Each structure stands twice: as C-alpha cells, then as structure tokens.
C-alpha cells in the first residue's frame, strides 16, 4: 500500500494543477470549463480504480467504492477543485487527492471499507467568485435557494444559474431536489495558518469551523478635490476615512482578543476608484470589503455593532458617507467529536497523537455539519499561508494522514505498510 498512496497523490496533484488560467499561481474559477476539466481528471482516475462515478444536478462528483456492509451509513470524503484567483496548489486538491488515495488503498489491500466510501468532489467552494458560501456542497444537500441562483460571478457579471447550466448542471433540479440522505463526511485540507508548521506536526483533527460576517461591496463616498488646493478642514477624503476605520477595528480586535474571545478581522480589498484616481486628487470614492470571523456568533454581532458605531463617528469627523452594502454570514460550526475520535484512534495505532484545533476558514465540512451530518476535517501543515501561489505542503504529510484514515477504518484496525 505504501507506494500506491504516494503515487496517486503525486499524479493527481500534478494533473489537477496542470489545469489553470495562465499567469501566477493557479486559477480555476467556480463553474468554469477549467473546474469541469479538473473534475474529469478525477472521474477518469476513479473509473480506473473500479469506482462508480455519478454527478448530481449541480455537477458535484461522487465516486463510490462498495463497503463490506452496503446498508451501513456511507462515508463521504473529499474536497473541492476550484481556486481563488492566483491561488495555491493544495487548497482543495490536497483533499481530493487524499480521498482518492484512501480509496486506492482499500482497493489495493483487497479488503473493502466497512461501509461504502464515496470520494466527493464539490463544485464552487470558494466564495470569491459568487457571494454565496459552500455552493456545491449546499446544492448536494438540497440547501441552495432560488435566490442563491441569482448571485452573479464577479468577473463575468453572469448568474450562478447561467454558469451552472453552462457546465452541465440543472439549477431547477438543484432547487427542487431533496438532496443527499444524511451520512458522514471527512475533509482533508491544508491548514490555512502557521500552527502545525511552527509545531512541526504533520496533521491535526479539526473540531470546529469559524463563522463569518462580511461586507463584500462596501463603499465610502467623499468629494474629489485638488490635492494642493483643498485645505484639511474642507476635505472629504475617503482614504483617510478608511484608515480611521482600519485603525479603530484593529484596536477593537485587540481588546476582544485580550478578553480571550476568538476573532479575526480583515480588510481584504481596497480600491480607491482606480480609473478615476490620480496623483494630484483627493480621493472622493473608495470601495473595500470587510471580513469578520469568529467561533462565537455573539462576538460577530458585537463587532458588527462596533463597526457601525465607528462608521458613524468617522462620517461626522471626515464629512464622508459609508455604504456598507449587503451583509453575508456563515455560522460557526462544531464538527463531529465521534468521527474525530475514530480518526484519533487510527492515529494512535500508528504512533501519532494529533491535536484538536479550530479552522479559521470556511469549508465544505461545515455545510455538511450544518445539514446534520457527522462531519470532520483533518488539517495538513502548510507554510507561506493559503490563497496565494506560495502555498506549501509536503505530500508525505498527506500520505501519512491517508494511512491514519485507513488505519481508522480498515477491517482489522491496522494499516499494512
């Protein structure tokens, strides 16, 4: 089994990441021909292993390996293949390659898994393309709405329904369909922070996913003026207004962390009206986005109120007006302690004692948990962060995690190396 796990991981990561828009890093937009092509790679590899491949109305891919007990609750395992613009090689693909490697390990051993193992490749996990969280997994679960289908992709201005249909999906069937029956879900994913790398730990079990509160299309309106002619007291400068908000939010963030609450605050995009702005002009308009994340809904609500209070003060002081725009939220989610314990036992059998930790980013595993599934994640250490071309991961760490999962669910509770 040792070789087959490494071989399929290396081959799949190479094949998937050969599919990208040109330019820095990796770009496979949600519901694009590139995302579809990456799904075809998995279908081809799964069929070669003897797995039965199906797709649902949203284009999610499922490759099923029959288990010993066909009546037992199946175990779905996988991740996504779309990326953020100019993203990295492992956010999503690592989990898909790991799921395929686990299926290959069971096939190679000649002993089936205890229940059906379903390699799962979701569509459109990255919400940068459409302002909707967990599109593919929520579609699979029957939890996507007609209103969600109207969301437009930021780079094309076309709706989710249009793009889904173009890539072979059926939006109407997604909305009306019952969705998958409740089962169990495991997602392998790179950690999107430095904790495991700094601790020199290959993997960890994730027991919760932060929720988010976002203003994706906020704007500050001021007055364009000459940079030399407009005195300070007469200016309505949107850049200084945003600077005031950023400094205030940083101060509030620090105070909440000192209270031992969980919180992350990010101003992820700033555009000072690029086409209109010039060296000698006081900026009269600025667009930005604000991303608040926490494992506590009360903290998100508290920060939202603080943002609005600071905005009111800045508007008065700077002579500007804020338009925060539509708010979107995702709920903090606890993951399955039972599945986490099973994976921990598999790790113990192989001499590991992985930590339990929180995920700062949102993931498909949260959508499955919110739908009532037993759902858990396994994090893999990475370096240089995530959502950028420098994402790092040692494929050997992924292979180790796959062996742990095999040990957790192999018939004799052992892994044959």
Image (cartoon, rainbow, N blue to C red):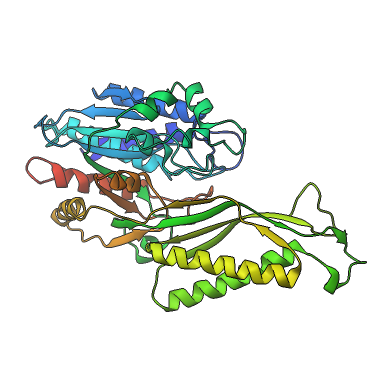
Residue at screen point 81% across, 53% down = 277
Where's the N terminus, which quadrant?
A: top left
Q: Report the number of numbered marks.
A: 0
Residue at screen point 41% across, 58% down = 360
Name of the residue lying farthest toward the right: 229
Q: Is residue 271 visible?
A: no
Name of the residue lying farthest toward the left: 412
Residue 398 in the image: above or below residue 62: below
Residue 40 in the image: above or below residue 93: above
Where's the C terminus, which quadrant?
A: top left
Residue at screen point 53% across, 26% down = 162
Q: Is residue 299 visible?
A: yes
Residue 144 in the image: above or below residue 58: below
Residue at screen point 24% across, 24% down = 51
Q: Position of residue 93 (x, y in %)?
A: 40, 39
Q: In the depicted view, which residue is nearer to us: 44 or 175?
A: 175
Report the side of 241 relative to 40 (left or right). Answer: right
Q: Position of residue 111 (x, y in %)?
A: 11, 33
Report the side of 217 relative to 300 (left or right). Answer: right
- Tell me where residue 207 sits by quadrant: bottom left
Q: Position of residue 11 (x, y in %)?
A: 37, 33
- Tell me where residue 14 sits by quadrant: top left
- Tell me where residue 69 sits by quadrant: top left
Q: In the depicted view, which residue is nearer to us: 355 or 390?
A: 355
């Amino acid at each position: 089994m040792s070789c087959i796990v490494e071989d399929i991981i290396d081959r799949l990561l190479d094949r998937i990441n050969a599919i990208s828009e040109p330019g820095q890093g990796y770009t496979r937009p949600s519901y694009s021909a590139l995302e579809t092509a990456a799904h075809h790679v998995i279908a081809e590899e799964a069929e070669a292993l003897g797995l039965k491949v199906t797709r649902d109305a949203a284009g999610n891919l499922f490759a099923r390996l029959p288990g010993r007990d066909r009546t037992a609750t199946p175990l779905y395992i996988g991740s996504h293949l779309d990326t953020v613009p100019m993203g990295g090689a492992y956010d999503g693909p690592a989990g898909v390659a790991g799921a395929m490697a686990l299926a290959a390990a069971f096939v190679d051993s000649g002993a089936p898994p205890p229940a059906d193992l379903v390699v799962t490749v979701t569509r459109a996990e990255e919400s940068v393309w459409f302002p909707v969280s967990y599109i593919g997994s929520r579609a699979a679960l029957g939890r996507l709405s007609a209103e969600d289908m109207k969301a437009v992709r930021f780079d094309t201005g076309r709706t989710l329904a249009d793009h889904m249909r173009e890539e072979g999906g059926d939006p109407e069937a997604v909305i009306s369909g019952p969705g998958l029956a409740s089962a169990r879900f495991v997602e392998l994913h790179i950690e999107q922070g430095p904790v495991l790398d700094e601790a020199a730990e290959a993997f960890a079990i994730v027991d919760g996913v932060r929720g988010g509160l976002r203003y994706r299309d906020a704007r500050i309106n001021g007055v364009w003026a000459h940079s030399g002619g407009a005195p300070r007291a007469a200016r309505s400068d949107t850049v200084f207004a945003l600077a005031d908000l950023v400094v205030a939010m940083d101060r509030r963030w620090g105070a909440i962390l000192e209270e031992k609450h969980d919180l992350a605050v990010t101003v992820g995009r700033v555009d000072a009206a690029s086409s209109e702005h010039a060296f000698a002009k006081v900026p009269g308009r600025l667009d930005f986005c604000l991303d608040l994340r926490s494992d506590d809904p009360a903290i998100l609500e508290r920060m939202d109120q603080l943002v609005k209070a600071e905005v009111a003060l800045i508007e008065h002081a700077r002579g500007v007006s804020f338009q925060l725009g539509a708010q979107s939220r995702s709920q903090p989610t606890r993951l399955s302690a039972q599945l986490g314990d099973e994976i921990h036992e598999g790790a113990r059998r192989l001499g590991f004692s992985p930590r339990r930790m929180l995920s700062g980013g949102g993931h498909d595993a949260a959508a499955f948990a919110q739908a009532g599934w037993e759902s858990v994640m396994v994090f893999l250490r990475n370096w240089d962060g995530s959502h950028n071309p420098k994402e790092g991961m040692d494929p050997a760490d992924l292979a180790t995690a796959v062996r742990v999962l095999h040990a957790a669910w192999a018939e004799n509770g052992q892994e044959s190396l």
